[in-house]
Image (cartoon, helix red, strand yellow):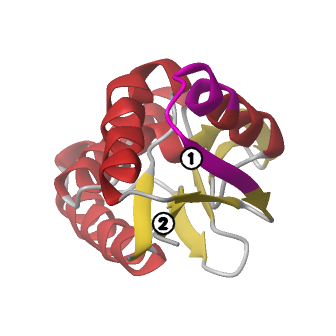
Amino acid sequence: MPSFDIVSEVNIQEVDNAINQAQKEISSRYDFKGKKYDLSLDKQKAEMKFSADSESHVNAIADIINSKLLKRGIDLGSLDIDKIKPVGGMMLSQSIRIKQGLETEVAKKITRTIKDSKIKVDTQIQDKQIRVTGKKIDDLQSVISLLKEKQQELKIPLQFVNMKS
């Protein structure tokens, strides 16, 4: 039976490259000269943390990171951004988690969308992805085009992988 998987994953190496580019840009910017700031990425937790001595600098770092991520093809919809918090020592901090995989609610919404479309395929939620199987490859391609149209509603970037015929 032909099948494919629906996933929502972010390439952590691309995020790391974007963070390195952001650090270079921040270190060369005039408004950050002599200011305290920190920017780091925890690859295991898929989380970025940054801090600075004013809210405007924290916002500037966030803008720089967002622009670098967009240039590297990373959808900002896969980011979970926390509020700015005081850390102590007159510093403010913000963290951004990178969503990896489909959350259960989103997966259920996707399967409901597929079932409502009346396309003759079966869906199965497996951990943080959805397996779609059908008798015809054309049906699978119809599901992919349907989900590409609905991607704005779902507010999460989707990838279609492991296509088997």
Residue 18 is left or right of residue 164, and the answer is left
> Residue 119: image x %, image y %?
49, 33
Q: Amino acid at mark 2?
A: Phe
Mark linked to residue 161: none
The residue drawn where x is 52% and y is 72% is: 1
Q: Secondary structure at mark 1?
A: strand
Question: Picture coordinates of residue 130 (x, y %)?
Answer: 65, 56
Most foreground residue, 91 or 107: 107
Instruction: Kindly tell me whether residue 152 is visible in this rendering.
Output: yes
Alpha carbon separation for disc pair 2 and 1:
11 Å
Residue at point 22%, 61% (across, down): 72
**Which residue does the numbered mark 1 point to in the structure image?**
121
Q: Write down the residue under mark 2.
A: 4
The residue located at (70%, 81%) in the rendering is 44
Residue 163 against residue 113 in the figure, above or below: below
Above or below, 88 relative to 136 = above
Q: Is residue 136 left or right of residue 105?
A: left
The quarter of the rendered structure image containing the C terminus is bottom left
Q: Is residue 120 magenta?
A: yes
Question: Left or right: 112 with respect to 60?
Answer: right
Mark 2 surroundings within 10 Å by alpha-carbon count, few (fewer than 14), some (14 through 19), many (20 or more)? many
Q: Please name which of the two marks, 2 or 1, marks the residue nearer to the observer.
A: 1
Residue with the most extreme front position: 135
Q: Quadrant of residue 162?
A: bottom left
Residue 114 within the magenta-colored segment of the rendering: yes
* Magenta residue span: 112-124
Q: Amino acid at mark 1?
A: Val
Is residue 83 at all visible to an observer of this figure? no
